[in-house]
Amino acid sequence: MADISTFTTKFSSHAHSPLPLERDGLGSAERRGVALLTTILLYLLLAGNVHGQTTQVTNPFLNSPTHLFTSKLTYQDNTFNGFLGVKYTDENNFRISFNSTMGNTLMDLEWKDGEFIKHYLPDQLNRKIIINKLQGDFEMMLLKILADGKWKNDCTLKVGCHKYRFTQNDIQLPTKLEDRNWLGRLKRTLNFGYSEQKKLSTILLKHHSFALQMELSSID
Amino acid sequence: MEKLIPDFYSVVNTTDLGNNSYEINVSMNPEAEVYKGHFPGQPIAPGACLTQMVKEVANTISGKEMRLVEAQQIKFLATVNPVATPELRLDLTLTESEDGVKMKCTAKDETTSYFKISGTLA
C-alpha cells in the first residue's frame, strides 16, 4: 500500500506541474492527441517485443532422414518391448513403424501433407480414442509441434488447450518438453538425451494422468 | 534338416557337453534377405527368425522334425546386429519329457547375453 500511495503522490505532483507542451502554446486537445499518439506508439513497441520475437528450437530428428530406436512401452504393470523406426521426408512429413521384438509390425502410421494416414493398426488399437492418443503422443514425441507453431520468448507455445514449455541445452537442442492443460496441470513430459556426438540417444515420454510411458534408445 | 531362411545363419560347430547340454557356434549372415526390411541400413535379427534358428538347431541335434508347441519364456535381452555380432554361442539343453523335448537355450557372445528361450518341442 505504501508503494501505491507514493506512486500516486508522485503522479499527482507531475499532473499539477506545468508541462513543456503547455509552455509551447499547445492546447488541451493537442496535448490529448500527442498523449494518444504516444500511447499507441508505446503499445506497438511493446506488442512487437512480446509477440514478434520467437525462440528458435532445433529439431534433433532432422539431422538424419531415418532413425531406429529400441522401445520399451510400459502401461501399468505391463511392459512391451520393440523397435520404432522413423523416416522423415521433411519436418512435417514423416512415417513411423512400430515393430515387436519378434519382428511383426504393430503400427505403421504416416503424417503427409497435413494428413494423418493409418497404413496399419491391429484391430485392438484401431479405435478412435486410442488412435487420437497415439497420434498426439507421436506428434509430441517427434516434435511435430515445432513445425506447427512459433515459440514465444519464454519457451512456451499454446496449441488449443495444450500449453507446451521446453527447456533446451547450450546448443539449442531441446532437453525437456512439458505439456500442461488449460488449468496448468502437468499432463505429459518428454525428455531427450544426447550422445557425446550431440546425436539423439534417448527419449522418455511420460504421462502424468495415467500410468503410461515410452522409453526409446537409439540404435547406431 | 531344411532351413526356413537358408541364408540367415550357418552352424560353425557343435560341441556335446554331456548331460543333454550342447554348445553351438552360429555365424550370422548380414547379407541375408530379411535385413533388407528389418531394418534398411540397420540390420537387426527379428526375434521370430532367432526362435526359428534355435528350433532348427535343436531339431538337427535331436535328429527329429519337431515344432515348438509351447514357449515358457522367450526373452530378447539385446538386439542381434549381424554386423556387430557376426557369431553367437548357443548354450542349449534338450531333455526328453512326456510332452516332447524340453528345450532351454541362451544366446551370448563374449560380453553380452542376447536372448533366452525355453519351451517344448514335439
Image (cartoon, coloured by chain):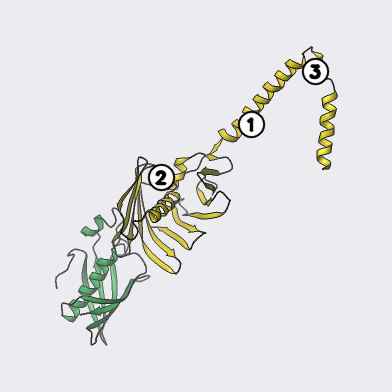
The chain carrying label 1 is A
The hue in which chain B appears in the rendered picture of the protein: green
* In the depicted structure, whether residue A65 falls above or below residue B90: above
Residue at left offset 47%, top offset 57%: A205
Residue B6 x, y percent position in the rendering: 17, 65
If you read the primary sequence from the N terminus, does the residue marked by circle 3 or circle 1 appear first? 3
Q: Tell me the amino acid under the disc marked 1.
A: Leu
Is B121 rendered above or below residue A190? below
Q: Tell me the tag on residue A46.
A: 1
Q: Quadrant of residue A55?
A: top right
Front of the two marks 2 and 1 = 1
Q: Is residue B72 left or right of residue A54?
A: left
Query: Which residue type carries mark 2?
Result: Leu
Drawing shade for chain A? yellow
Q: Badge 3 sits on which subunit?
A: A
| Helix, strand or loop for disc 3 | helix
Residue A159's spot in the image, x, y percent? 50, 43
Which residue has dot 2 on it?
A62
Residue lying furthest left in this view? B2
How crowded pointer 2 is (Cα within 10 Å; few <14, some 14-19, many 20+) is rated as some
Q: Callout 1: helix, strand or loop?
A: helix
- Label 3 CA crowd tier, 10 Å (few <14, some 14–19, many 20+): few
Q: Position of residue B98 (x, y in %)?
A: 23, 87
* Label at residue A20: 3
Q: Are marks 2 and 1 on the same chain?
A: yes
Amino acid at the residue labelled 3? Pro
Tell me what residue is drawn at x 37 percent, y 53 percent.
A128
